[in-house]
Image (cartoon, rainbow, N blue to C red):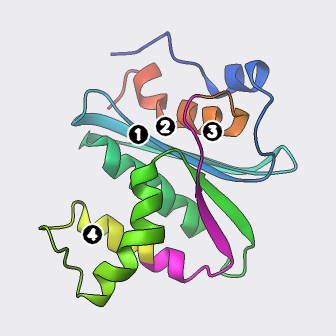
Amino acid sequence: MARSDLLTPQQVLRRFKDGPKTGIFTDGSCDPNPGAGGWGFVWVEDDAIVEEAHGEDSDTTNNRMELQALIEAFKRLPEDAMLTIYSDSQLCVNTVNEWAPGWARRGWKRKSGPIANLELVRELYALHLSHPTVTLAWIRAHDGSRWNEYADALASTFLREGTG
């Protein structure tokens, strides 16, 4: 079902001006969770769009879509890229920056049980390692940061268009 209350990317550009002006901004969405979901990213330099993409999955979770958005963003970068990728998912940022190195050393095992979405986590971590000069950072969701809001609008395209 289409949701007309969600902002389009064009509406976001008219409404929001704050936040970082360079980097890649990613987001994932799912409604309900689990259920139909979408992911999106926007790569900007000096407040201008370099590239953007979005996709959907008819049966997924919010965390899977957050991970997929990051994977798709990293795939677009040359290995020598020097920039920051922003995610509003603290879980994803902590997974890559803090937990995945230990899990990898232990053969992708966690002390307290299985790793959720392991195939996506492993793919994302490998992409992160192949881009040593890219920083993955957390950004607060829905605080008016223009490009984070834009990524959110891309991730929720499936809801506005009634697909998924």
Q: Which residue bears the numbered disc 4?
A: 119
**Of label 1 and label 2, which has the lower sequence position?**
1
In the rendered view, does 50 fall on the left or right side of 5? Answer: right
Q: Which mark is residue 113?
A: none
Residue of label 2: 155
**Which of pointers 3 and 1 indicates the residue nearer the eye?**
3
Q: CA distance from mark 4 to mark 1?
A: 18 Å
Disc 1 element = strand
As displayed, is residue 8 above or below residue 65? above
Q: Going from the N terminus, do you reach mark 4 or mark 3 first?
A: 4
Residue 24 position within the rendered picture, expressed as x and y whole percent measured from the top left: 66, 54
**Amino acid type assigned to the residue bearing label 2 in the image:** Ala
Q: Can the viewer see residue 97 in this picture?
A: yes
Q: Earlier in the sequence, mark 3 or mark 1?
A: 1
Q: Which residues are magenta?
A: 126-142
Q: Nearer the viewer, mark 4 or mark 1?
A: 4
In primary-sequence order, the first of circles 4 and 1 is 1
- How far apart marks 3 and 2 lie (CA) works out to 11 Å
* Mark 2: secondary structure: helix
| Membership of 158 in magenta stretch | no
Badge 1 is on which residue? 38
Q: Position of residue 45 (x, y in %)?
A: 82, 53
Residue type marked 3 = Asn
Give, as a three-letter code, the residue at label 4.
Glu
